[in-house]
Image (cartoon, rainbow, N blue to C red):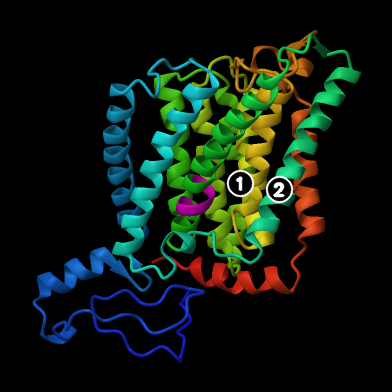
């Protein structure tokens, strides 16, 4: 499919990226380039390999981001470990350690994204990556309320069914407020990092440079890694979400539907989001499937609201309620410094077992309920509709 040119934008010299979908204004020209027909063939070939109609090609952008993120995370991590701000113990789930461990990845992500945005000449810099939608604060707060309510519904259903038991109140006095705030900060960082990586940068970049066959290739690599490395902890959840996305994405591809690139990217980012959870302690296949499914739900919220702010708020509140407020296991890990105390009971299929509430089959209808909520309250009205053309244009391969 051919990209749509904006007739108001002036012609851009060869080698400079064109304006991105949804961006306005005149591109900044900082240098004069040799006309394309006078450039050596090798230079034209290199420019074609690196730059598409929307700037740096998606594959090169992602590779650059990964290298920068890894380098910055290593550097910041070294400093944090050196000054004993963070622990290198994988399952050290304390409030302070969690906060500083996530701060490492947050700083690395922001730094990498800022540099890539500068290379790609993104107007708005970091906000260009699915953060520039209207009403960010309202979206975040409504997502926070939705996330806490949804997790509470899940906890309530487990309790009513006898699959979860409440114990003693674990905190008292000032500790209640202290740990509430520290865990809130930690999970705000967790949500910012995971949503920033998957629903902001990666979703945006893949949307502008992916098609069905590229998406299928990435999904095949993910599943192949699980097969050949025998990576445990619920790998069938990955196979399930990968299979569910196959037919819808193929149909969109065959119909050449407008905006199909967004949903091809959603298939990849959601599967990848579930994949990274397979290394967690105590996961089962339902928990992994649920992680991928909630990743899909967050992409739906991005499509419906025009930005990732609702997803960030919902993600932070879900984790905060599960870990701190109710004191349940989160992806197999029980943290210290929680307010209430809960424990699973009965068959793991219903209780979630060591995985926690996210490993219960009841989590699936709760996640589906979240999708209904976001679609009902943010149905594609005037504001959200304005974000659709940008996503549709961005779906064209770069």
Residue farthest along the right direction in this orientation? 160
Is 368 or 40 nearer to us in this picture? 368
Q: Residue at x 37, y 18 (%)?
A: 88
Indicate which disc residue 373 carries.
none
Is 398 or 149 nearer to us in this picture? 149
* Residue 90 on image: x %, y %: 44, 17
Residue 8 higher or lower than 168, as above or below: below
Q: Residue at x 50, y 25 (%)?
A: 98
Q: Classify residue 184 as left or right of residue 124.
A: right
Report if residue 172 lies within the magenta region: no
Residue receiving disc 1: 312
Magenta extent: 198-202
Q: Classify residue 307 as left or right of residue 210.
A: right
* Residue 165 on image: x %, y %: 82, 11
Q: Which quadrant of the structure image shows residue 79? A: top left
Is 244 or 326 nearer to us in this picture? 326
Q: Residue at x 32, y 63 (%)?
A: 118
Q: Residue at x 60, y 22 (%)?
A: 331
Q: Is residue 221 visible?
A: no
* Residue 5 on image: x %, y %: 45, 84
Residue receiving disc 2: 143
* Residues under numbered marks 1 and 2 in contact, where contact means CB atoms less than 8 Å apart: yes
Q: Secondary structure at mark 2?
A: helix
């Amino acid at each position: 499919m051919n990209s749509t040119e904006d007739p108001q934008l002036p012609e851009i010299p060869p080698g400079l990226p064109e304006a991105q979908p949804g961006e306005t204004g005149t591109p900044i020209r900082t240098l004069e380039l040799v006309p394309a027909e006078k450039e050596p063939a090798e230079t034209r070939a290199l420019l074609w390999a690196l730059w598409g109609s929307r700037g740096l090609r998606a594959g090169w952008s992602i590779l650059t981001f990964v290298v920068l993120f890894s380098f910055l995370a290593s550097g910041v991590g070294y400093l944090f470990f050196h000054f004993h701000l963070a622990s290198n113990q994988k399952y050290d789930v304390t409030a302070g350690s969690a906060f500083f461990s996530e701060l490492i990845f947050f700083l690395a992500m922001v730094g990498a994204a800022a540099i890539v945005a500068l290379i790609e000449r993104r107007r708005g810099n970091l906000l260009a990556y699915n953060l520039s939608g209207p009403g960010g604060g309202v979206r975040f707060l409504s997502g926070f309320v939705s996330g806490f309510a949804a997790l509470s519904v899940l906890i309530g259903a487990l309790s009513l069914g006898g699959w979860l038991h409440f114990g003693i109140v674990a905190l008292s006095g000032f500790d209640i407020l202290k740990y509430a705030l520290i865990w809130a900060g930690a999970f705000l960082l967790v949500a910012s990092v995971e949503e920033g990586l998957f629903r902001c940068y990666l979703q945006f970049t893949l949307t502008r440079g992916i098609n069905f066959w590229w998406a299928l290739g990435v999904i095949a690599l993910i599943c192949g890694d699980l097969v050949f490395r025998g990576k445990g902890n619920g790998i069938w959840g990955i196979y399930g979400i990968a299979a569910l996305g196959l037919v819808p994405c193929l149909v969109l591809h065959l119909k050449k539907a407008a905006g199909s690139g967004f949903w091809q990217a959603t298939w990849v980012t959601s599967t990848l989001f579930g994949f990274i959870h397979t290394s967690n302690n105590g996961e089962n296949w339902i928990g992994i499937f649920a992680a991928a499914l909630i990743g899909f739900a967050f992409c739906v919220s991005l499509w419906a609201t025009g930005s990732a702010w609702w997803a960030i708020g919902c993600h932070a509140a879900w984790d905060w309620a599960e870990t701190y407020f109710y004191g349940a296991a989160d992806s197999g890990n029980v943290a210290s410094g929680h307010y209430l105390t809960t424990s699973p009971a009965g068959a793991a299929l219903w209780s979630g077992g060591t995985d926690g509430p996210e490993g219960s089959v009841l989590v699936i209808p709760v996640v589906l309920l979240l999708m209904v909520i976001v679609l009902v309250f943010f149905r594609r009205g005037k504001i959200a509709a304005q974000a659709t053309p940008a996503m549709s244009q961005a779906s064209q391969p770069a």
